[in-house]
Image (cartoon, grey):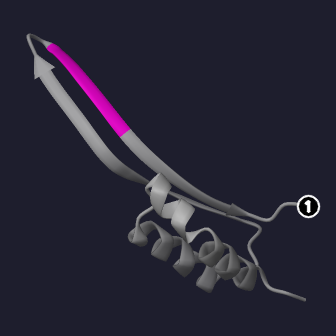
Amino acid sequence: MKMNKEEYEKLMKRFALELSEVGVSEDLTKRIQSKVSRTPNLAYLADNELVSRFVYRHNGYMIEAKQTVELTVKKCK
């Protein structure tokens, strides 16, 4: 039986360029990787990270924009 950890590592190597283009940081991939190491046969893992944030205040108004990246690894049938 092939473990999910092995499949995860294959997928991360295969899609490394696409992940970096989306904005997935090295820290986020390491957090997911540590979760996979602790529990290698989980069917679902997810984590998210705030990539950038902008806040502007003027005359009692506030504009806030956030860019968040979520990385999800799950086993599909």
- The image position of residue 37, as x and y in percent, is 60, 85
Q: Residues within 10 Å of mark 1 (few under 14, many from 20)?
A: few
Q: In which quarter of the image is residue 40?
A: bottom right
- The image position of residue 17, as x and y in percent, is 53, 66
Residue under the point 39% across and 41% down? 67
Q: Could you tell me how many numbered marks the image carries?
A: 1
Residue under the point 49% across and 53% down? 22
**Segment tinted magenta in the rendering:** 61-66
- The image position of residue 41, as x and y in percent, is 76, 79
Q: Residue furthest top?
A: 59
Residue under the point 16% across and 26% down? 56
Rendered view: 69 above or below 64 = below
- The image position of residue 42, as x and y in percent, is 74, 73
Q: Mark 1 points at which residue?
A: 77
Q: What residue type is labelled 1?
A: Lys
Q: Would you say the magenta stretch is mainly helix, strand or loop?
A: strand
Q: Quadrant of residue 45?
A: bottom right
